[in-house]
Image (spheres, coloured by chain):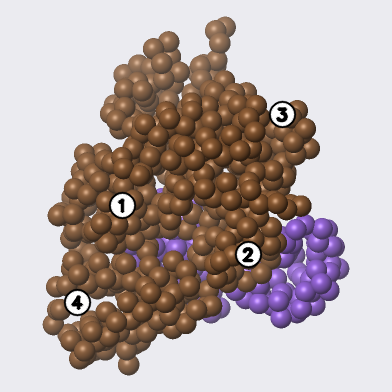
Chain colours: A brown, B purple
Amino acid sequence: MSEAIRIFVPIDAAALSVGADAVAQAIAREAQARSVAVEIVRNGSRGLLWLEPMVEVETLEGRIAYGPVAARDAAALFEAGFHKGDVHALRLGPVDELDWLKRQQRLTFERVGVTDPLSLADYRAHDGLKGLERALSLTGAEIVEEVRESGLRGRGGAGFPTGIKWKTVHDASATQKYIVCNADEGDSGTFADRMLMEGDPFLLIEGMTIAAIAVGATRGYIYLRSEYPHAHKALQRAILKARNAGLLGASVLGSGKAFELEVRLGAGAYICGEETSLLESLEGKRAIVRAKPPIPALQGLFGKPTIVNNVLSFAAVPWILTHGAKAYADYGMGRSRGTLPVQLGGNVKRGGLIELAFGISLREIIEDMGGGTLSGRPIRAVQVGGPLGAYLTAQQLDTPMDYEALAGIKAMLGHGGIVVFDDSVDMAKQARFAFEFCAKESCGKCTPCRIGATRGVELVDKIIAGHERPKNLAVLRDLNKLMTDASLCAMGGLTPMPVMSALNHFFEDFDRPPAERLPLAAE
Amino acid sequence: MVHYPAWDQDEARSIVSGLSHLEGATLPILHALQEEFGYVDPQVVPLIAEVLNLSRADVHGTISFYHDFRTAPPPRRIVKLCRAEACQALGCDTVVEELAREHGIVVDDHGSQEAVVETVYCLGNCALGPSALIEGELIGRANADRIAALCGARQ
């Protein structure tokens, strides 16, 4: 009997959400019924989410993709000889030849979808741990310098230079330092962190370990949002395996340097994505933001020097250490170096994960790769950078994906999420929602955010209802300016961004004939 | 369907002391209690306060701050429905309306319902929305009929 055929069925939450488990079971059942020896590998997702569950079969000509596969397709697929890579209506061809993947520049996501996420052997076979091994041959200062030279900026949204943050922690003297990963990916339209944690969790562990070695930290926490149960499972299993293999623990890869890593679950509070409230939460308190200074790099978790970085920031580091700072910096434009995993979602035909060097235009992403709206109606608005990001018009889509270029049109890149809306969207309603969301999720520490957001909901309601419109529009603009200038953190400070962009670009939605009755909040 | 045992203060005590050695132990303790009993009974507050050397106000403040923690036994079934922007773009508001109109399910109504549909903001499935999460299972391209069926699936 010949060797088992390797068949890949993603275990990524998005793939599971459209039936990947049932597909894996059906394939196993059919294979057994036909006495075909198969080994089913549960890989991460390649990010072609509209084709999930996308099944891949390993053949002599490489891996052949089929998708989207439903459990009921399994019998017909075997009939057609898909386990040999043969033709079937769902056959997409060799994975590496898929246009969506061929156009990308995958550095951080190079292994996601390719490997078995929980096999350390597979990780090593695909260049895993090379970055950490190199880091262990350098001094802490040399590692920090390498990260600084790469031009890597925090991928969580604020875009602060990672190397400078690391240097501050490196130079601080303390009995204890911490590494904290902000895995509270709460922004609507973003899922890259989740895909990475589920599809290549050892990469995050490796990146955090390099950070620990660089600055002399011995403890680390991954603060994960509770809405991600699949990522939680993947991380816990990966950490256990890493510890058993000596990658974590008292002596990282036999170096004599200790690093202990633990996952901590959030409890459904969006504000925990803000680094200081995340630290409060890790300490067991209400997640109220802290005033800065002092910065967390000097007084972070339990008052100790702490690196707080996003999942993708840590995950970029092993590649940088493996290939060198310059190789990374050669990607990108202006002061945005390297690659950005873009997440395309909302009302779009082909949504998913696209990793590319900074600089591609929104239009190329949404129209060329995304294929326009799912509904087939014209695009009216695109929100970039999460719920606190601006709404752009179809005319603004030639803007490149770059921190400064987006700031130039009063928008922001954030964590690289793009949400597409068709022409059925009501932008006054979206502006109202931005305030409503802020009111619900505000930590309450500062007045502009706590009170301002509630007032904002009332104002938009009055404007929609046609109640003293010019006056209330003036108050709304004033409130937005106040929240921008006087809020303690980005939650209150950026809520005006979606509101003002909706107001400035889609004013007609605020200027309709009054509704018959005043909505509740305005009464 | 998850069945939880009735609150047991002795069992709660052993959960609290078993995790009290952790740095910043409050959230892990609260999660562990809720996983065991389905909710965090307010009678555990003085216990946590004592073991972690916190004020009762600190512990109460933490429990009440976070959306996840419940202080009363949960309904038999909880469906979390995403109502953030990406799912809005795919009509999650229509799902909410249809649930009420066609199935008599009012989202976020915790009245006497056996099954409750709760709002969450983003499940990280933004390209396959509207999305819902039920007992750890993520559902993509959800619609009102499917969610209503999940609510009524209890035998």
Q: Residue at x 45, y 52 (%)?
A: A160
Q: Which residue type carries mark 4?
A: Phe
Label 3, label 4: how far apart the Cα atoms are: 60 Å
Left/right placement of residue A22 relative to residue A412 reads right
Q: Identify the residue position indicated by label 4 in the image.
A: A510
Q: Chain of mark 1?
A: A
Label 4 Cα neighbours within 10 Å, binned few <14 / some 14-19 / many ≥20: many
Between disc 3 and disc 2, whose residue precedes?
Answer: 3
Q: Is residue A411 above or below residue A198?
A: below
Q: Identify the residue position indicated by label 2 in the image.
A: A281
Where's the N terminus of chain A, which quadrant? top right
Label 3, label 1: how far apart the Cα atoms are: 40 Å
Q: Which residue type carries mark 2?
A: Ser
Q: Identify the residue position indicated by label 1 in the image.
A: A404
Q: Which residue type carries mark 3?
A: Leu
Where's the C terminus of chain A, which quadrant? bottom left
Q: Which residue type carries mark 1?
A: Glu
Q: Chain of mark 3?
A: A
Using the rendered image, report if marks 2 and 1 lie on a common chain.
Answer: yes
2 and 1 marks in contact (CB < 8 Å)? no
